[in-house]
Amino acid sequence: MQKETIILGIDPGTTVMGYGLLKVTGSKTELMVMGVLELKKYSDHYLKLQKIFSRTLSLIDEFHPDFMAIEAPFFGKNVQSMLKLGRAQGVAMSAALYRDIPITEYAPLKIKMAITGNGNASKEQVADMLRRFLKIPQEKMLPQLDATDGLAAAYCHFLQMGKPETEKAYKSWKDFIAKNPERTK
């Protein structure tokens, strides 16, 4: 009997958080669920962070993933946006660490390369490739591409399983601190 692995993928954001869960049995992959957490209606940034934590924790408690794959923030021009995105990512990671779920961060370029072979691929191209790989009927695709971005992080992790570690992976708070000593100062 082949071992079943579940991967939770997260595309963090303070306006919309995308997520996708992938079931892996041997080399076979299957979409479990994908969706978005809409945060536009909340004006309080701290309430948004609480909603991100709660939703991530509820996904973990419902689906019991073995791993979390999360898109790392990219360096944009707006420092405030980057800080907010980093907070959103950190809160989602905190939920996984709270439940002892190992985390791996993937740069957006790495995810796009893994899915499409092109680091400059559009969100639409990534979504279309995932639809084909996972045989998702067109009518089941969500209009919010944040959902497929979360699923893409999970699929990228599936493709990296068994390969040497090239991204930062954390198994616990202690492990996170050991790999990021500059963040404890």
Image (cartoon, rainbow, N blue to C red):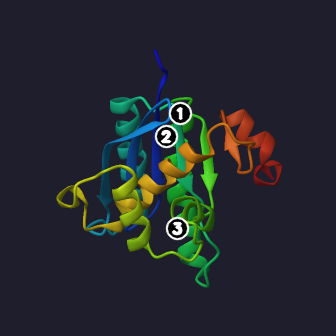
* Residue indicated by mark 3: 84
Apparent side of residue 168 relative to residue 62 in the rendered image (left or right): right
> Percent position (x, y) of residue 94?
54, 43
* Residue indicated by mark 1: 98
Count of labels in the image: 3
N-terminal label among 3 and 1: 3
Classify 22 as above or below 4: below
Alpha-carbon span between mark 2 and mark 3:
17 Å
> Percent position (x, y) of residue 141?
25, 60
Residue 40, image quadrant: bottom left
Per the rendering, the mark at residue 95 is 2
Per the rendering, the mark at residue 28 is none
User: How many residues crowd around disc 2 within 10 Å: few (fewer than 14), some, or many (20 or more)?
Assistant: many
Provide the secondary structure element on which disc 2 rests: helix
Q: Which residue is drawn at 31% across and 56% down?
A: 37
Provide the secondary structure element on which disc 1 rests: helix
In depth, the one of 131 and 150 nearer the eye is 131
- Kind of residue sitting beneath label 2: Ala
Q: Do the residues labelled 1 and 2 touch (CB within 8 Å)?
A: yes
- Kind of residue sitting beneath label 3: Lys
Q: Work out whether residue 84 can be spotted.
A: yes
> Percent position (x, y) of residue 143?
25, 68
Q: Work out whether residue 44 can be spotted.
A: no
In depth, the one of 93 and 117 nearer the eye is 117
| Residue sitting farthest toward the top | 1
Alpha-carbon span between mark 3 and mark 1:
21 Å
Apparent side of residue 137 relative to residue 37 in the rendered image (left or right): left
Q: Residue at x 53, y 36 (%)?
A: 67
Q: Do the residues labelled 3 and 1 touch (CB within 8 Å)?
A: no
Alpha-carbon span between mark 1 and mark 2:
5 Å
